[in-house]
Image: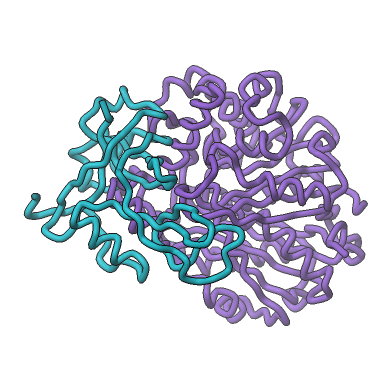
Chain colours: A purple, B cyan
């Protein structure tokens, strides 16, 4: 038994990224996107039988389902968490589908939101990143905290460059093609700003070897989706985006104990997801891959089997990742150009995958036919990674 | 020794790491080795992450010679914590010790542009307070 085709995403709602929303709190944003997703699905509150509310990392998620149950006036018969940081949005697809396949619920609501950057840091505030786990506070911070995750992903990029020669000019391909997509998405934070390879390579070094235009910008936002049992999904207003497979692999919390961290753990999630879906990388119409940094996407492409490990450098240059290209990637602009509202950043790939399957992405709708979408999520520093396949048909 | 060290330090070591910090105060770099599978383990914990280790408490303290290599590194040019502002650009690195474990640290006394993956390094101790010493590394000549 598995969840292949058992459920579909039938409702979505996403807030336009803003630098921050200091006047809002987590609960009010969760309420706004949750109600939006239920309306989009054409459902009523009382249809929702399972809540999966994801904390933004700064607020304890321990009682979030109960809080939002009271806030929204929704009394589900099951509730759960995801707790996979940036991997949560994509991981939630398989989780919701599994609950539905097991008969725990017919309609599941998944949501997250972020009022302000919970790292409470970054360049604007000049403070250290959030570090809740003792492995980080005890063994990393005393040697000089890095802004957000910049330094840790920089070490991955450094390692990749050392092993395979993937330099900034080659990595820039991801940032540039995704920006073209963002330039066709009015909701994207960098809608008005085109960039070139030279712009990326000449942008300020943030943490060697990563440059400014290879990094996401933290912002505020939120997103929610409703998953429904497949046979019920067909009666709802929008074309369903069927969930054919998914996985979420937890690897570690720090970088100290990896065989070699130039290899992303999404490999295990990808294998399991493709096996469940009955399709492989070459069958995918478009890709919505978690993009905290250029190097994140590159490792995910390699480890998911779109090119051989270490060969991304030349392979990337032969692809057209724009919405009108041969292999559209992060058609909304990706988090690097759309914005990263913390854990809701990982939900943006789900939102966009669903819009593309529906054919409702507007100006950035892929010009090729979209029937299969491959998605990834990533949390921490390759600490936890998820994968999923969405499809237009429940096969 | 700095009298007023203003940078972040661990106030309460975890259950398994108090002994590590005590040894660090005596300039001894400890790591754990598993009596069941012989794996080198760091950071300190109570049980071995090895695939065949199912018993709690198989890890014993060992002392490292402090020699290793740069596994990866970055140059921090923008401090996330203003207390480090006067040190930028500094090298934040993951060091692989010859005994087979890794730890985060700094590589100092070198132009950051000269650091490379694979360079041999040797530990030295930075006595940041009367009680706390941090292991840091210099290129081994």
Residue A189 visible somewhere in the drawing: no
Taking the image as shown, residue A303 lies to the left or right of residue B93, namely: right
Query: What residue lies at 15% left-to-right and 52% top-to-bottom?
Result: B128
Q: Nearer the viewer, residue B57 or A216?
A: B57
Q: Nearer the viewer, residue A335 or A244?
A: A244
Query: What residue lies at 72% left-to-right and 74% top-to-bottom?
Result: A50
Relative height, residue A58 to residue B6 (above, below) = below
Locate residue B91, reporting x and y percent: 30, 35
Number of numbered discs overlaid on the protein picture: 0
Q: Which of the image's four quarters has the N terminus of chain A?
A: bottom right
Locate residue A92, reporting x and y percent: 68, 60
Relative height, residue A354 to residue A50 (above, below) = above
Locate residue A138, reporting x and y percent: 33, 58
Q: Nearer the viewer, residue A318 or A266?
A: A266
Q: Quadrant of residue B19?
A: bottom left
Relative height, residue A59 to residue B24 (above, below) = below
Locate residue B87, reporting x and y percent: 20, 38
Taking the image as shown, residue A65 lies to the left or right of residue A271, namely: left
Relative height, residue A352 to residue A50 (above, below) = above
Residue A73 visible somewhere in the drawing: yes
Query: What residue lies at 53% left-to-right and 40% top-to-bottom?
Result: A260
Taking the image as shown, residue A308 lies to the left or right of residue A19, namely: right
Q: Nearer the viewer, residue A113 or A381?
A: A381
């Amino acid at each position: 038994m598995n969840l292949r085709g058992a459920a579909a995403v039938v409702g979505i709602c996403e807030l336009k990224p803003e630098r921050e929303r200091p006047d809002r709190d987590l609960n009010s944003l969760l309420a706004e996107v949750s109600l939006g997703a239920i309306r989009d699905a054409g459902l009523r509150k009382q249809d929702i039988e399972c809540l999966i509310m994801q904390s933004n990392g700064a607020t304890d998620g321990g009682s979030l389902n109960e809080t939002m149950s009271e806030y929204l006036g929704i009394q589900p018969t099951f509730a759960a968490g995801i707790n996979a940081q940036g991997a949560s949005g994509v991981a939630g697809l398989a989780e919701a589908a599994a609950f539905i396949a097991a008969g725990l619920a017919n309609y599941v609501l998944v949501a997250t939101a972020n009022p302000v950057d919970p790292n409470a840091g970054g360049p604007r505030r000049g403070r250290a990143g959030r570090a809740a786990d003792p492995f980080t506070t005890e063994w990393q911070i005393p040697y000089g905290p890095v802004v957000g995750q910049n330094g840790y992903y920089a070490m991955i990029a450094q390692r990749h460059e050392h092993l395979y020669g993937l330099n900034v000019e080659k990595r820039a391909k991801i940032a540039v093609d995704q920006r073209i997509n963002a330039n066709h998405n009015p909701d994207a934070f960098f809608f008005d700003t085109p960039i070139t390879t030279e712009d990326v390579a000449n942008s300020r070094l943030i943490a060697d070897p990563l440059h400014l235009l290879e990094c996401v910008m933290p912002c505020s936002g939120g997103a929610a989706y409703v998953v429904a049992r497949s046979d019920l999904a067909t009666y709802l207003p929008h074309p369903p985006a069927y969930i054919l497979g998914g996985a979420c692999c937890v690897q570690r919390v720090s970088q100290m104990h990896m065989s070699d961290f130039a290899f992303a753990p999404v490999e295990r999630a990808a294998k399991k997801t493709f096996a469940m879906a009955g399709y492989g990388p070459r069958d995918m119409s478009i890709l919505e891959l978690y993009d905290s940094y250029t190097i994140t996407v590159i490792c995910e492409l390699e480890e998911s089997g779109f090119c051989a490990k270490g060969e991304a450098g030349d392979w990337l240059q032969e692809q057209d990742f724009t919405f009108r290209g041969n292999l559209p990637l992060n058609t909304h602009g990706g988090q690097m150009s759309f914005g990263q509202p913390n854990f809701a950043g990982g939900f943006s790939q789900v939102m966009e995958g669903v819009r593309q399957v529906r054919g409702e992405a507007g100006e950035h709708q892929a010009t090729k036919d979209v029937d299969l979408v491959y998605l990834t999520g990533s949390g921490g520093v390759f600490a936890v990674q998820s994968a999923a396949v969405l499809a237009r048909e429940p096969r | 020794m700095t009298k007023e060290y203003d940078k972040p330090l661990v106030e309460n070591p975890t259950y398994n790491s108090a002994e590590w910090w005590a040894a660090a105060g005596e300039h001894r770099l400890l790591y754990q080795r598993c009596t069941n599978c012989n794996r080198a383990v760091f950071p300190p914990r109570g049980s071995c992450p090895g695939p065949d280790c199912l018993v709690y408490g198989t890890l014993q303290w060992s002392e490292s010679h402090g020699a290793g290599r740069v596994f990866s590194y970055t140059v921090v040019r923008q401090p996330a914590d203003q207390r480090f502002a006067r040190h930028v650009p500094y090298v934040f690195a993951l060091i692989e010790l010859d005994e087979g474990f890794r730890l985060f640290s700094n590589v100092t006394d070198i132009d950051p542009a000269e650091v490379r993956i694979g360079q041999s390094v040797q530990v030295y101790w930075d006595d940041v307070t009367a009680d706390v010493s941090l292991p840091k590394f210099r290129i081994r000549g």
